Amino acid sequence: MAVAVAGVLVAAGAISYAVAEDSGSDATPTAGSADAGFARDMSVHHQQAVEMSYIVRDRTKDEDVRRLAYDIAQTQANQRGMLLGWLDLWELPKVSADPPMSWMGMGDMPAGKDGALMPGMATNSDLKKLGTLSGKQAEIFYLQLMTDHHKGGIHMAEGCVDKCTVGVEKRLAQGMVNGQQSEIDLMAGMLKERGAKPRS
């Protein structure tokens, strides 16, 4: 726990420095800005990816899947810490009364069903099912869920690259696009090895 806290503090310091040195807008984002909206929504999106990754690590002994799950969990937990750190730095709320993805002009999309708040997110039923599977079945379902999750995440990150004004946040979003697309390609190969393919 102490290590995790220390990591967050280091990240917060890095965030402060990065924002201070940023070549983008000098203005602090507002609560209704794309910068704040992306930080809030992607932190929720990332939290589910972390949750799914820890579920599958307990449901399989396959080292490739366990390594991928660990990498995704660590990467997205760290990025989530940065996003929440920016909201703290900007003194903005971490929740909003606006529907998810309103900052992208998608606030009028149908309300998420069964706990899936944003595109790509797994439903509560999906998460429950993942927790009941084991071995190859768990691996395949996790890879399918995470592929969908990454596709939704990429769409949102591309929205920030287009609409956000804080340069360091735009760069983080572009890094998410690149990293998650690479993982989608990797997971397609892993699914093929298991005689399966993405759901969509």
Image (cartoon, helix red, strand yellow):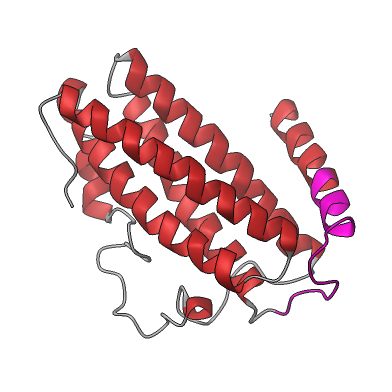
Image quadrant assignment for residue 11: top right
Stretch in magenta: 14-30
Asked if the stretch drawn in magenta spans residue 20, the answer is yes
Quarter the N terminus occupies: top right
Q: 82 or 164: nearer the eye?
A: 164
Image quadrant assignment for residue 121: bottom left
29 left or right of 109 in image: right
111 left or right of 103 in image: left
The correct choice, above or below, for 2 with respect to 120 in the image is above
Q: Residue at x 37, y 66 (%)?
A: 117
**Residue 21 in picture, x, y percent from top left:** 88, 55
The correct choice, above or below, for 94 with respect to 12 in the image is below
Q: 86 or 183: nearer the eye?
A: 183
Residue reaching furthest left?
195
**Residue 95 in picture, x, y percent from top left:** 59, 70
**Residue 42 in picture, x, y percent from top left:** 52, 59
Asked if the stretch drawn in magenta spans residue 124, the answer is no
Q: Residue at x 76, y 61 (%)?
A: 88
